[in-house]
Image (cartoon, rainbow, N blue to C red):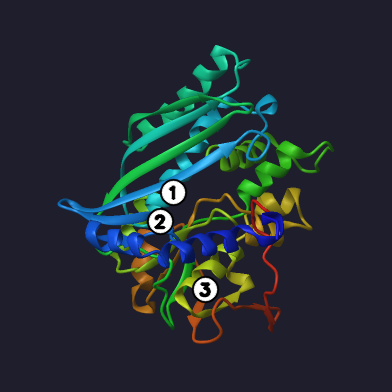
């Protein structure tokens, strides 16, 4: 079977199972004190100062962006922000990063400077020190970021959602998808204004990782979280599978920014549930903490509840009827 037909999530599961079946890898996990490895937003292992978090992500020309149509400062920003978001979703504090660049020989030096200015700007905004990396010649531009952080036990984990936990998101979804559609569209879209154009653009190209929100969730006693990178329903499905639980979601509780409805009236619900690259935090929290959530995370929204049932199942309540969500249209590299 070709990996195109296997799917990204299945590839990750295959790699995870292969690692877990290797005796040496299991021995090393125990020796080093690994607490979280393949399958969550970051890995984590014990150190004298707490848990060390580590994550990595890659952005590739013509897969994640188009170099000829992109502001390279914004691409640099986004390459760091996506990794910071993983640290945020664990309730951690970012500390250091390694940057690996694959550079085409014909790339202009000024373009490289712009790219790295964006990388530095994002890292410095979130108090993250760039401590090294690598540069290689490549037929296409790519950026790989390895991000490190620290967190005191316990971390937030996607596998710790419990029956009766409320399910929430720290902010609005769908705006990044609107920015992507705006950048791809060859047609004149209706109701565009300077305000919503900038709103959509910033959401897609200049995401703001939710570092403080992750820490607040941890302080409130939340145990389960992950960042929304592949789409709200797609990532919720992953969380439910990891936690071996199901969920009921009320469609009327899923917030839709009015500017999305104005420009994309027929796609707004699809965009907020399956858009991807939102980098908000999807979380579970006990119902007795709801007042504190509203007070400390005023931009958050409770959209449903976890319940016992078939692992991974999302039941959507819409117009008074219950529907089983059978298809997830979020991002998958190998679709």
Query: Disc 3 designates what residue?
Result: 241
The quarter of the displayed image where residue 250 is located: bottom right
Query: Disc 2 designates what residue?
Result: 89
- Identity of the residue drawn at 64% across and 33% down: 61
User: Number of numbered discs present?
Assistant: 3
Mark 3 residue element: helix
Q: Is residue 165 left or right of residue 143?
A: left
In the image, farthest residue toward the front: 23
- Identify the mark nearer the N-term, 1 or 3: 1
Q: Nearer the viewer, mark 1 or mark 3?
A: 3
**Mark 2 → mark 1, Cα distance in angstroms:** 6 Å
On the image, the x and y values in percent for residue 326 come to 69, 74
The answer to whether residue 96 of the structure is visible from this angle is yes
- Identity of the residue drawn at 54% across and 12% down: 109
Q: Which mark is residue 85?
A: 1
On the image, the x and y values in percent for residue 142 come to 56, 32
85 is higher (above) or lower (below) than 73: below
Q: Which mark is residue 151?
A: none
- Identify the mark nearer the N-term, 2 or 3: 2
């Amino acid at each position: 079977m070709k990996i195109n037909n296997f799917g990204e999530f299945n590839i990750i599961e295959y790699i995870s199972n292969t690692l877990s079946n290797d005796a040496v890898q299991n021995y090393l996990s125990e020796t080093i004190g690994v607490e979280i490895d393949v399958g969550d937003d970051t890995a984590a292992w014990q150190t004298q100062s707490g848990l060390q978090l580590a994550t990595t992500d890659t952005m590739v020309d013509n897969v994640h962006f188009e170099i000829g149509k992109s502001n390279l400062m914004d691409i640099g920003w986004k390459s760091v922000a996506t990794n910071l978001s993983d640290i945020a979703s664990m309730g951690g504090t970012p500390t250091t990063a390694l940057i690996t660049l694959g550079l085409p020989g014909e790339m202009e030096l000024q373009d490289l400077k712009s790219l790295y200015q964006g990388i530095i700007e994002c890292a410095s905004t979130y108090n993250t020190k760039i401590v090294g990396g690598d540069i290689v010649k490549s037929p296409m531009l790519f950026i790989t970021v390895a991000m490190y952080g620290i967190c005191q036990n316990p971390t937030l984990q996607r596998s710790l959602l419990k029956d009766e936990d409320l399910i929430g998101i720290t902010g609005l979804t769908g705006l990044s998808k609107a920015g992507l559609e705006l950048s791809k569209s060859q047609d004149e879209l209706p109701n565009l204004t300077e305000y919503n154009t900038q709103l959509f653009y910033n959401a897609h190209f200049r995401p703001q990782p939710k570092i403080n929100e992750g820490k607040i969730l941890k302080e409130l006693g939340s145990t389960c979280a992950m960042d929304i990178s592949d789409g709200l329903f797609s990532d919720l499905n992953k969380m439910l599978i990891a936690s071996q639980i199901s969920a009921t979601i009320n469609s009327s509780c899923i917030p839709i920014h009015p500017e999305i409805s104005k420009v994309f009236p027929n796609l707004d619900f699809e965009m907020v549930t399956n858009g991807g690259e939102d980098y908000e935090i999807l979380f579970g929290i006990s119902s007795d903490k709801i007042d504190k959530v509203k007070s400390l995370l005023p931009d958050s929204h409770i959209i449903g509840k976890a319940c016992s049932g078939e692992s991974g199942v999302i039941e959507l309540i819409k117009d008074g009827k219950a529907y089983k969500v059978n298809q997830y249209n979020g991002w998958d590299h190998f679709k």
